[in-house]
Image (cartoon, coloured by chain):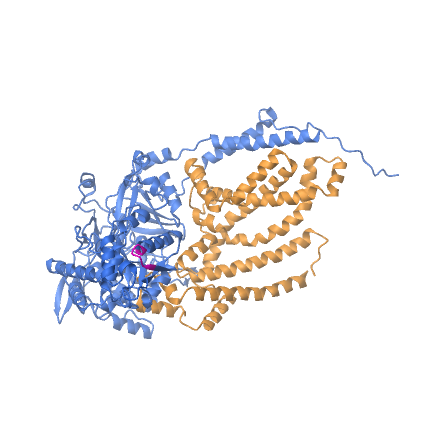
Amino acid sequence: MTNFWKPPRQMDKSVSPISRPLNLFRISDFGLRVFLLCCAFALCGCDNNPNPPPYHERRADGSPWVVRYASLVSDPKSFDPQFAYDVTAQRALEPVYDRLLDYHPMKADPFELIPSMLEEIPKREDAGEGKVSYLCALKPGILFHDDPCFPDGKGREVVAEDVHFSFQRICDPKIESPFYEPLAQRVIGMREARETAKDAKYDYDKVRIAGFETIDAHHFRIHLSEAYPQLLYWFALHTTTPMAREAVEYYDGLVHDGTVRPSIHKFYTVGHGPFRMKEYVPRQRIRYERFDGYHTSVFPSDGFPPEKAQWLQQFAGKPLPLFDELHFAIILDTIPGFVLGRQGYIDGITANKDAFAAVVTRSQELTPKYKARGLELEKVMMPNTFFLSFNMQDPVVGKNAKLRKAISCAFDVATYCDIFYNGVSPVAQQLLPRGLFGFDPNYKNPNGYDPEKAKRLLAEAGYPNGRDAKTGEQLTLTVEEPADGSELRQRAEYEKRAFETLGIKIIVNENTHARVLERLEQGSFQLGSGTGWMADYPDAENFFFLFYSKNFPREGANYCRYSRPEFDAAYEKMATMENGPERLALIQQMNAMLDEDCPIILQFSKAYFSATQPWARWTHNNPIMEGGFNKYHQVDAAERERLQPEWNRKPLWPGLALGALIFGGLGYAIRWNRKSNV
Amino acid sequence: MFNYLVRRILYAVPILLGVILITFVLDNVMTSPDEKASRVLGPKVMGKARVEWIHNRGLDLPLPTQFARHLGKLARLDFGTSWQTQRDLRDVFLTGALPSLLITGPGFVAAFCASVSLALFQVFVRNSPLDRGLTLLSVGLMSVPTMVYVIFGQAILALWLSYFPAFGFSFAGFGTVRFLLLPVTIFIFINLGYDARLFRAIFLEEINQDYVRTAHAKGLSNARVLTVHVFKNGLIAIITLVVAQVPKLVLGSLLIESLFGIPGLGSVLVQAIQTGDQPVIMASVFLGSVLYITGLIATDICYALADPRIRLS
């Protein structure tokens, strides 16, 4: 008979791992202790440097290979110089493509153009009937980067036809160049080229631009239908940089011999600048390596700021670039950028909102902690002006200058800047920002904050204490506010309260920034917030055109719909003039007209602080290229090698403490379980 | 089973059509073509350039025509091109899936193992002060927002202790692991509290079943009862909760990927939302719904496989 019952199995307490409490100090638990130690060492051995190893350790001459680490806030939209317009793309293109002219890296007040690929700044030639021409001479010996698109893979010399090819590309509708319209207004033959390109496949050989005359390999002349001195600033933009036709045709994004060639319109570059782009990994990094064939420009020998002049002398006349490899980390969020900066893995810390309190004191100095580390603080003054726009066609605010002035005088911009920009951004006193010809540092906005004046003006405007003098009704105004985030809502609230101190009622229409712009374009608003202008190039024309009556939306950005014949006449004259006393007088007249009519409420020009690492002291502080001018930067690799490990020491005890905690808990559990089972 | 599967897949078609229609309508109600152009080209590009951009993308066509085109493209799995980065979206999704899975895959498995272990451990020491302490800890872990985990992880583990890179990613063989350690750790902690509480409740329900008393009566140790009998039976309930999550792992983790610079699909979506990249948003929503439906079907299948009493018909 089978016995189905079995006696309970006796537990062997000496074998079962959970039958006795764990004791880390017993010999049999030695393995666990070793495991714990290994974990701790593994953690300590884990390198926290996120940057990949440099391409080389040493240069050909044996000196150390120097890398500069910087960051971008987003992916570039394109690497096509004729298409890319966003700031990130311009920063990403700047190391690869030199421009025909450059800005002097040390001269930011006023900004100054210097030759880059051109031998000298082109001179204006009058061609009769109001037409003008610019004769340009390319420096001989500028080479394209070596690339398989060229015969034998060797980059050829840059010639005048390459500049013409760039202009042809701007006309090509397939490229969707945003630069076409402003250039086509002046450069003869661009419109015709565009029309031809629309009809059939654009044949670059047949369709030449009439206003572009190629004289020889290094000389070309550009013919304009009217005087346009700003053309020189266009030469300092990437859009007019020479492009190799071989490269554009070779890198077409199609499959050739079973291999996909990247598209130059999107992610590939064949440039002639100081660096070659070696790697682009979307949402991670862009890496560049020095181009040995670069001899286009050298480090300037003048314009040094007095406080750095002695130190900068060592670089004067040196060949560029001053370092060998450039690494852009693409960091979409602000916090990681700050952390990497603190660890020394990027060469600077931008004191944005998240990092400001840690980096900058209330008196706008570097905090002692960072001062002790040897960082330096640089203040970057952006060439932009922000303002609120009145709708000059609105029946209430558009017809009543005193009402607009009253509202402007009620707005305390200084406090606004203190709250939302930590007092770093200066209050704008005039339309033009610092660094532009016509900017007057002593000028004071007559419609600036003055609460008493605001009330007086409001009464004179027919609204004493904010009520209509005739009907007694409270004045109600609507403000279009971009409110994409909590901070923007706070700004909207501040503006509402500021205006309501006058006794008027403010209705805030919160929307996305794009929707606010749409309303401004449609003209369906009374007062629009979040408007302003960042200089495309540092010329007064680039700001005053915002109030030119022929620039009403949708073609232009005169959101205010400001129209005054005297202003238009002055603008038309000023826009075509070279800088000089006469032009300055016109700018002053236009400023006075804007003050008199008050179509905008001036707010501020944006500024920010950046803390630079001890090994990457800035040679220059020029905001016009927004973090560009990479070739002029210097890096002291030895200093970085000394300080980085010091700033990234790994303590052993937290790993051990964590392990002890876990195993202590396990021991406790087993003891408790044994006790409860007794 | 086969008939059931076919039926479920057919049910999924109208659901997917509904999702596509709703996202399309929402997109067009929320943003006008001008607004889209302004977000992509920037506020300075106006006039003819903007009109041309709108025309080239067919945004000036009647909405039904646009919707028909959109459907046709999705049917061919042609997601189009990103407006912001000009990249082919099929390529974006294919290259983004692996980094996402490298975070969510190990994170999901480790979080599952850790939660189950912690839940079993709590059941093991149930009603003790340690159990109560761990319950409190789990509630705490559940309550902390993801952003806080990331900030503390970066501040303490990466910045203060210098154990991990605070940011970045690179396919560098074994070297990739160091970029994953901190995000995966955070991913585990984000899920640990909720999962451990849930699994503990499931296991506690099992521990009072008759078969457990029988197992004890047979003389089995506490550990064996828990790890073999309770765990196995509790797993049926757990599978139903967990399997639905698996396909969605491909989509990654929105915040972790963005804040650690992991080039996965989560960060693609965050960037697309921030920059108004409509093709990416539409394709991501479509992909998300496909994966969600797949997860639900997989759950049903796993449920039937794990529990012989369930029959799909």
Q: Is residue A445 left or right of residue A2?
A: left
Percent across and percent down for residue B171 are: 45, 47
Residue B301 seen in this snapshot = yes
Q: Quadrant of residue B223?
A: top right
Rendered-image quadrant of the N terminus of chain A: top right
Q: Nearer the viewer, residue B246 or A167?
A: B246
- B265 drawn magenta: no
Measuring from the top left, give residue A416's x and y in whole percent. Answer: 30, 50
Left or right: residue A631 versus residue B114 is left
* Rendering coords of residue A617 (x, y %): 27, 41
Answer whether residue A503 is magenta in the image: yes
Q: Does B52 sit above or below residue A617?
A: below
Q: Quadrant of the C terminus of chain A?
A: top right
Colour of chain A in the image:
blue
Residue at 51% over, 61% down: B286
Task: Determine the image quadrant of residue A576.
Answer: bottom left
Residue closest to the eye, A413 or A27 = A413
> At which x and y percent is residue A168?
27, 67
Q: Residue furthest left?
A: A581
Picture residue at 62% right of the left edge, 38% below the top: B122
Q: Nearer the viewer, residue B189 or A548?
A: A548
Report the magenta residues as a range. Answer: A499-505
Colour displayed for chain B in the image of the structure: orange
Number of callouts = 0
